[in-house]
Image: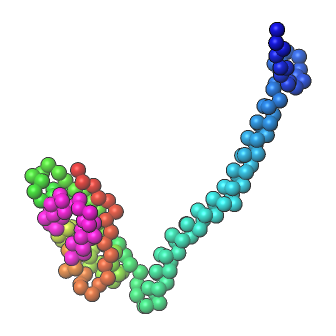
């Protein structure tokens, strides 16, 4: 009869099952891994997120400082929400829902707000003239923004700097 190797056990109180020696080593390695992970998180990962957040904030502040140096005003936004149109040629079976934001100099913002209903109507007309392919083509987003910029030009003037944003865009 072959002899079986003896298991290494630690002394235990009576009635408790004997623990294997490897269990303590495993718990020590787990605790060490948690400490190393916490240190990496605190000294490596967290500073990277902080730098990313600072980098995102800096351009806005820098842009405002440059604008004030030029003697300009801060830009104001006019948001046109929940614009829903049927694309041309869809026979009403498809629709596009979008939000358009125009960012203009503060001096032009009141004029744009006064004409908000007219601007919204012009945006709806421009979007309704586009086909489904016009909305989904690879270069459609820049062309869409250019179209929306031309829509607002009669209300703010040709020389006014206008930024166009489309934060919501759904095709159904």
Q: Is residue 125 above or below residue 89?
A: below
Question: Position of 165 compared to 56: left or right?
Answer: left
Pick the quarter of the image with the N terminus.
Answer: top right
At horizontal 29% and vertical 84% (from top left) the residue drawn is 160
At horizontal 25% and vertical 81% (from top left) the residue drawn is 156
Q: Is residue 8 above or below residue 77?
A: above
Q: Nearer the viewer, residue 72 or 87?
A: 87
Question: Position of 121 compared to 79: left or right?
Answer: left
Q: Is residue 82 visible?
A: no
At horizontal 27% and vertical 87% (from top left) the residue drawn is 159
- Give the total number of marks visible in the rendering: 0
> Which residue of the protein is positioned furthest toward the top in this rendering?
1
Q: Which residues are magenta?
A: 125-150
> Which residue of the protein is positioned furthest toward the front in this rendering?
1
Q: Nearer the viewer, residue 150 or 43?
A: 43
Q: Is residue 84 above or below residue 116?
A: above
Q: Is residue 57 above or below residue 138?
A: below
Residue 6 is drawn in which quadrant?
Answer: top right
Q: Is residue 128 magenta?
A: yes
Q: Nearer the viewer, residue 14 or 96?
A: 14
Spot occupied by residue 31 in the image (x, y as percentages of width and height): 76, 42
Spot occupied by residue 155 in the image (x, y as percentages of width and height): 22, 79
Q: Is residue 18 magenta?
A: no
At horizontal 58% and vertical 62% (from top left) the residue drawn is 49
Spot occupied by residue 91 in the image (x, y as percentages of width and height): 9, 52
- Snapshot colouring: rainbow
Residue 27 is drawn in which quadrant?
Answer: top right
Spot occupied by residue 4 in the image (x, y as percentages of width and height): 82, 16
The majority secondary structure of the magenta stretch comes to: helix
Q: Is residue 123 visible?
A: yes
């Amino acid at each position: 009869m072959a002899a079986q190797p003896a298991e290494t056990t630690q002394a235990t109180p009576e009635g408790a099952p004997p623990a294997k020696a490897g269990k303590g080593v495993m718990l020590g390695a787990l605790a060490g891994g948690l400490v190393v992970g916490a240190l990496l998180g605190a000294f490596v990962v967290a500073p990277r997120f902080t730098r990313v957040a600072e980098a995102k904030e800096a351009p806005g502040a820098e842009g405002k400082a440059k604008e004030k140096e030029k003697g300009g005003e801060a830009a104001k936004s006019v948001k046109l929400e929940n614009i829903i149109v049927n694309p041309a040629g869809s026979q009403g079976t498809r629709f596009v829902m979008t939000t358009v934001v125009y960012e203009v100099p503060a001096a032009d913002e009141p004029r744009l707000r006064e004409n908000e209903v007219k601007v919204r109507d012009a945006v709806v007309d421009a979007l309704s003239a586009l086909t489904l392919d016009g909305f989904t083509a690879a270069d459609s987003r820049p062309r869409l923004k250019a179209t929306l910029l031309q829509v607002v030009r009669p209300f703010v003037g040709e020389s006014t700097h206008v930024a166009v944003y489309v934060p919501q865009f759904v095709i159904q």
